[in-house]
Amino acid sequence: MSQIIKIKRGLKKDLTILQEGEMGFCTDKKEFYIGNGTENTLINKDVNIKVENSIISNDNPNNVIELVAGNNINITPDETNNKITISLKNNVETKEESQAKANTAESNAKIYADNKVASIVNSAPTTLDTLQELAKALGDDPNFATTITNMVASKETPQGAQQKANIAEGNAKAYADSIKPTTLPANGGNANTLDGKHVNDFAPSGYGLGTMATNISSMDLNNYKITGFFRGSNVINAPNTGWFWFIIIGHDTGWTNQIAISYGANNIGNIMYSRIYQNASSWTGWNRIAKTTDIPTKLSQFANDIGAGSGVKITTSVNSPSAINAGDFWYKII
């Protein structure tokens, strides 16, 4: 498009503030001004103004401005509007058009560069799309290829690994064959044994497990709270000093049940007692466990048992007693 330079023309009193680069000519004073948007500057009449190849001269003795058009310059007077239009013959880009072309060129250059980089990266993940990231991934090793070659050379090949596995398998089979029995017992072997030992052989010692009850004579029974089977006489804190079997059942560190069964010399056989260790603090007293033969089945068995010598007296008879003391009980048999 053409770029047009306009020169305002008129009386000096009518001259307004010219825009930046705008020119004005006062016909009455024969003065030439150029503006900057805030004020007008008088151009010395003895100075020629050159616009590219065009010269605005004021050397005419009649004070006539001579405009000489150079190449690519058009001068068009407009007497009706009191102005002279100076335009360029060829198309000259504006500042905006030049900037737009520069922006386009810059964008094209960026796209070209990005495409070249993308062809090198070849869709690599974002964590490996720069040379620095690739270097870090390779351990910053300038001799990476040599390092990998040496590492591979130090590793076992599949053929070598298989050979070693075959040797290990053969050794295992040979060892198994060397320890297996050549013959079995006549009964086919005892399923309750392991490596020649019975299951009872693996029970912990000292608790009467898998063997005879452990003798704890003269020991303190309060110290036995773990499950086990024991025996002994003169056992401290037993029901008495006679012989007993002791069955101990441990629940946890705070609760244990002890059962004592009398037998042997200095004791009445087959009498059972029980007590409990509770709340990890104390033992209860011994309680005798009654047998069915200890429980009366008829009233006559109570006769003279309660209150013997004093206290409550129980009498059974078909006749009423001649005298009854306070607390005595009489039961009539009909």
Image (tube, rainbow, N blue to C red):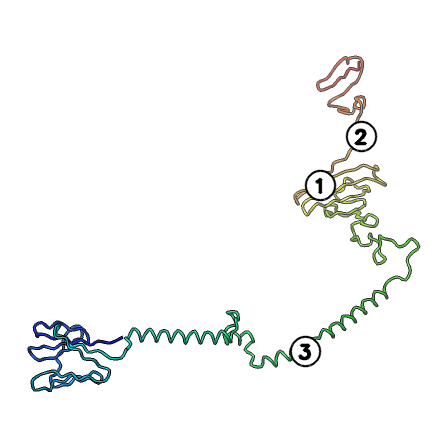
Quarter of image, res 16:
bottom left
- Viewed as shown, does residue 94 lie left or right of 198? left
Above or below 60: residue 157: above
* Residue that badge 1 annotates: 276
Q: Residues within 10 Å of mark 1 (few under 14, many from 20)?
A: some
Q: Nearer the viewer, residue 73 or 26?
A: 73
Above or below 70: residue 240: above
Q: Nearer the viewer, residue 265 or 200?
A: 200
Q: Nearer the viewer, residue 81 or 225?
A: 81
- Viewed as shown, does residue 223 lie left or right of 142? right
* Residue that badge 2 annotates: 294
Above or below 321: residue 266: below
Marks 3, 1: nearer the viewer: 3
Quarter of image, res 62:
bottom left
- Viewed as shown, does residue 39 lie left or right of 217? left
Say what secondary structure mark 2 lies in: helix
Disc 3 marks a residue whose amino acid type is Ser
For the residues labelled 2 and 3, the Cα–Cα distance comes to: 88 Å
Disc 1 marks a residue whose amino acid type is Ile
* Residue that badge 3 annotates: 154
